Amino acid sequence: MSKYTEEEKAYFEKEYQDLLRLCPKGRKTEDNLAMIRKAFDFACHAHEGQRRRSGEAYIIHPIEVAKITAGEIGLGTKSVICALLHDVVEDTDYTLEDIEMMFDKKVAQIIDGLTKIKSALKTKTEQAENFRKMILTLSEDARVILIKLADRLHNMRTMDAMPQHKQLKISAETRFLFAPLAHRLGLYSIKTELEDLCLKYENPVIYKEITQKLKDSEEKRQHYLNRFTIPLMIKIESLGIDYHITGRPKSIASIWNKMKTKNVVFEDIYDIFAVRVILYNIPVEDEKTISWKIYSLVTDLYQPNPDRLRDWISTPKENGYEALHTTVMGPEGRWVEVQVRTGRMDEIAERGYAAHWKYKGHSPEEGQLDRWMEKLRETLVNPHQDPVEFLDSFKLNLYTNEIYVFTPKGDLKRIPQGSTVLDFAFEIHSQVGIKTVGAKINNHKTVSLDYKLASGDQVQIITSEKQEPQAEWLDYVHTAKAKNGLREMLKSERKKKIKIGQKIAEDALAEAGIKLEEGIVRRLLNGYRQSNKQELFYKMALGQMDLSKLVQFAQKKRENRFLRYWKLGVLKDKPQEDDQAFDDKGMLILDDDSNYSIAPCCNPIPGDQIIGFKSSSGIAIHKYNCERAIYMQANTNAEIIKIKWTKKREQSFLVRVKLMGFDRMGLISDITKLISEDLNVDMRTVHFDSFNKKFEGFIDLYTHNTNHLNNLMGDINKIKGIKSIERVEKMD
Ligand code: MN
């Protein structure tokens, strides 16, 4: 037996007819109408027996929300269905699966989003957190947000029966969350109404007073409006344009704002209304010209304030708003704001982007709706222009370059766009970060450390006790937290390794009765061709140095050929133009023990143009055009030092060359023989891979300068089978 009275049933039916009238005309296919009817009947049935605090049947609420969705926002069938069903899952025993079975997957997804927002708002977390979740939902379907706004608007309109503390809580949420959101989406009339309703509950005395005063002054205002507009109407009439002029008072909330900020009383506010000139039946291509023509008519009659001219036609606001605004001096020396719009612009202004598609052809297809939904979503997440008002009340910009990902337990983490698995791991904890080997995304896909995460990903970090942080990981991380954490780890790892290396050297030398003192260290540096002892010990710990030569090097006095390192001349103050201008004057000469290092990203050798960066750990030398160096110049405040190679002494520098060609018997021995015997160049490592007769190889060798290297490469290139040889900048 139905729990609705006959009277109620008749009322619902009338409401249903109202709803249909509000639905976009082009979409009233038989199928669509049948679906709306089905949703309507199902919602009536599901909410049967439920009543709102005011005593009226609960179903009135979803019906009104559906009417707002269609009539005030301009959405289509699917949204109307969702609006009718929006509280079913939350408030009745029906589930999402039921909805999906009765309707379709999309409807179920939207209802799911609406239900999630509802429960998010119920939790005690900060509102900012809820907002983020809403934005997240948005990325799936913007209709969720629009229907939520309709829901909120109807709730705000019907809060009278609620206890005051609830009214205040809901108002606060509306003020900080929903009204800015409506503004951002260009839904001006909804935004204005929401703000007025907030004031009504938050400050009922003021609300009543202003409402009353607006009513009392209506006649006077109308009189003034006539004086202002009649001369204007005569002029517009002569152009033969279809138009409408209104003098709508400003919203109660904005009048109250003005009273507060300017510290004035109601009677002192002159521009309580704005005169709006709406021009109909204007072809889109003529809109701008005709709007400016009207502007010209207005300013022929009244003196404009040049500071208050706003041309939102040439550059529409981010939320789609278009109009021409000016403020002129009206009769009695009062400022009056005049807004000029076409019918199309007016609809966009009142109903937001939803009105756009209406003017772009009449095919009311989902695809088109999806496109403006996409545009709307972009608008929401990319506030480039004029979001000032919005940002002031809600710091949306905090979230625009960020993505939201979930831990396996469902906790939400906010990280910058472009973040990788490794960033996320460091976000959890640096101890997790350094042990990370990869991750499992959304419970199925296994990805590597440098995998870029997307919003909504659920990330399960995979760690291994055997993992050790690597220097190249710095290329995979974006967040400051991960970068700093990683650097710290690398530094302390390196320190540990250096100590281990030093111990290895000490122990090995002790067996030969040699003490590792400074003179010996210098001999070792020379023997192993390393530029500083930290590097030497570090490489020893990593097993990259041949320990069998340790004692031999420690006993060997410096040879002449590789006796000294190149000296680096550091120009103080004045940069020098060329080599001729280069002399000892004004130069700082670095000796062997000077703390400089060759940057591993570009490995410059004498002959390359170079640049130095001074830091607490010494001077890092980069190639002049090294990408890293260019980045550092632009983004750090490391001291830049103009620097050149001196020609005084010789040092050998390690470079890597890459060889490619066709493999043949004896090729590798030909190459290595040429390098080490004929050219008398030391090689450090040689690595060749051969496949399908082709080979690719790397040789690390010591060279003096670019001339030396170029000659060497020329000689190697002459070997039969070699197709190409090139220098590789980045070595490790
Ligand atoms: Mn609701």
Image (cartoon, helix red, strand yellow):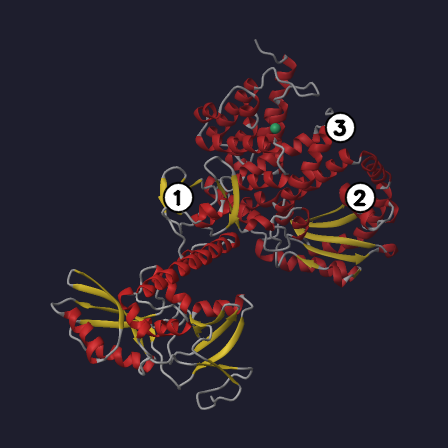
Whole-percent x, y for residue 654 in the image: 33, 72
**Label 2 crowd (10 A; few <14 / some 14-19 / many >=20):** many
Asked whether 30 or 154 is in front, the reply is 154
User: Can residue 475 be seen from the camera position used here?
Assistant: no
Q: Earlier in the sequence, mark 2 or mark 1?
A: 2
Q: Earlier in the sequence, mark 3 or mark 1?
A: 3
Circle 3 residue: 164
Q: Is residue 305 left or right of residue 622?
A: right
Circle 1 residue: 463
Asked whether 34 or 173 is in front, the reply is 173
Residue 256, numbered label = 2
Q: Is residue 534 left or right of residue 293?
A: left
**Label 3 crowd (10 A; few <14 / some 14-19 / many >=20):** few
Q: Earlier in the sequence, mark 2 or mark 3?
A: 3
Is the C terminus in the top left, top right, bottom left or bottom right quadrant? bottom left
Is the N terminus in the top left, top right, bottom left or bottom right quadrant? top right
Mark 2 or 1, closer to the camera:
1
Residue 192, numbered label = none
Q: Secondary structure at mark 2?
A: helix
The disc labelled 2 sits on which kind of residue? Trp
